[in-house]
Amino acid sequence: MNSFCLSSNAHGSIRRPFPFPSFHHLSIFLSSTFKPLLKDLEQVKLKLDVPKLMKDASLKLLDELVDSTFQFINQPTLPSQRNFLPVKEIGEETVVTSIDGDIPEDFPEGTYIRNGPNPLFGALQSTVSPLGKSSNIWVEGDGMLHAIYFSKNNINDTFTISYKNRYVESETFKIEKEKSRPCFLPAVEGDSLAILTAYILNQLRFGKVNKYISNTNVFEHSGRCFSIAENHIPQEIDLLSLDTLSNWDVNGEWNRPFTAHPKKAPGSGELIITGTDAVKPFLVLGVISADGKRLAHKVDVELERSILCHDMGVTERYNIIMDMPLTINIPRLLQGGPLIKYEKESYARIGVMPRYGDAEAIKWFQVQPYCIFHLINCYEDGDEVVVRGCRAEESIIPGPEHGLDELDNYVRDEGFLFSRLYEWRLNIKNGGIKERYLTGKEFSVDFPMINENFIGLKNKFAYCQVIDSIASSECALPKFGSLVKFTFGEETGRISGVNNENF
């Protein structure tokens, strides 16, 4: 069966974009002010390196400490949030018998596959303890694969459609599945002391500071299919069985988080990736060979801050780096602030980097502050590099400053989270910048998709999901209700045609 990979997010939720500092990096950062604590931690680590019997006893004591101190609580789900609830894993392929509409006769055989968050134990988790509260944020949850298979009967040109789902079985998923209960303490949002303790205890118990959830994107490279969330490296997936095969670290050459939205370079077929972390080097860019066997280029971008860099772009000659003020900041966490925050008073830049360049070769363009999770496309137009994406004035990750219960104030009438098509034109020769909205205030859009054959090249069409502002306000989470097709004008790049289709 020929196959193709497309991806989306589960239940229409925004794709999960946050990395986590490693325990090693966290220890380095804390060493200057918390040396006594670190000495104690090193002593604990040494105790875990004794023969297996003693190690098992130590781990059992740690488990008992966590069980007696931390209470796991299922986060509540409103009736209007039913579509965010997890679904059961069915494992076996099931024939779809109820189909609305007709499949075109020339439609190819193949597979549509996506992943998304699907909490293993029925709900996202919070923990409460004397140290405070920490919680999974709304885009977390164990990654589940959903595949629809299109098989054609060549005798009568009819299709058989079947569906299958499977969890992505990462190492951390297997740990909790074997124990049949939540084990990893939430370590993204909440009280700073609770989050820092979660990092330490998760590392001591499991050798990892957080779960590898693999719930954000599915991509293909060199005929292989991968599932990814950018706090870890990808997992290779068997497209037919949906078995999780192995982690992909490019033959041991990539040892850090891996962007959820890698891009294939036009012409060469190389895969361009980035990896962001909470400590230096904050952002590293890599070029993977077209056959997927080697890392052809790897360079520290030398950013001055850790950013939540969820997407990046390519053109025929350049890599495009989006340096926006959605930051990950350990000092802020230590001072009682959030780990992830959109710093709306800070600066924003776009970097244009030659494919095999280094940090000094990047040409940076200072632009108006923006928040963008998904680019539409980038391409070269004479002396200009054109960058298009879905831009908002603030971030939905981890949530509005005053909580998701006030999402109504943000999604309506071009509020802070109102996302519209936006274009930057960056002149490589003279440093000039032109930036503007391409759409009006009629609707908010995100999750753009184009014909992948035009990634990095000038394209005419783009497709986006349209946010249902009323349903989002009632739900307190973003919901999408329709699809829109945009047609870009030949000369100015303006939108010359819009076609909106309700789900």
Image (cartoon, helix red, strand yellow):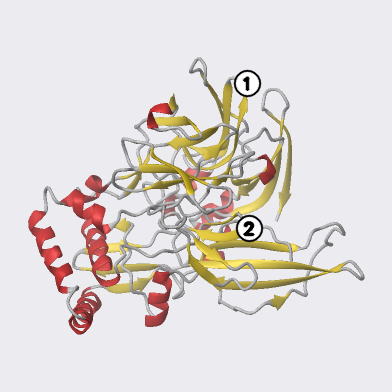
Q: Amino acid at mark 1?
A: Gly
Residue count near mark 1 (Cα–Cα under 10 Å), binned few <14, some 14–19, many ≥20: few
Q: Residue furthest right?
A: 156
Q: Foreground residue, 422 or 351?
A: 351
User: Could you say which disc has been placed on residue 187 in the image?
Assistant: none
Image spot of residue 149 (x, y percent): 71, 68
Tell me which residue sits at (11%, 67%) in the image: 43
Residue 446 image point, x, y percent:
58, 45
Residue 141 occupies quadrant: bottom left
Whole-angstrom CA distance, mark 2 to mark 1, is 33 Å
Q: Is residue 103 left or right of residue 492?
A: right
Answer above or below: position of 97 versus 115. Answer: below
Residue 180 visible in the displayed image: no
Q: In the structure shown, which secondary structural element does the residue marked by tag 2 occupy?
A: loop
Residue displayed at 44% across by 64% down: 213
> Quick one: label 2 or label 1, which is nearer the N terminus?
2
Q: Is residue 114 left or right of residue 252?
A: right
Frontmost residue, 281 versus 202: 281
Whether the residues at callouts 2 and 1 have beta carbons within 8 Å, the answer is: no
Q: Which kind of residue does numbered mark 2 sit on?
A: Gly
The residue pinned by badge 1 equals 382
Which quadrant is home to the C terminus? bottom right
State left or right for residue 236 relative to residue 48.
Answer: right
x, y percent for residue 323:
42, 36
Picture quarter with the N terminus: bottom right
Element marked by disc 1: loop
Q: Residue at x 73, y 62 (%)?
A: 2
- Relative to 395, is 454 on the left or the right? right
Q: Nearer the viewer, residue 464 or 21?
A: 21
Which residue is at 74% across, 74% downward?
Answer: 96
Q: Is residue 324 visible?
A: yes
- For disc 2, the marked residue is 223
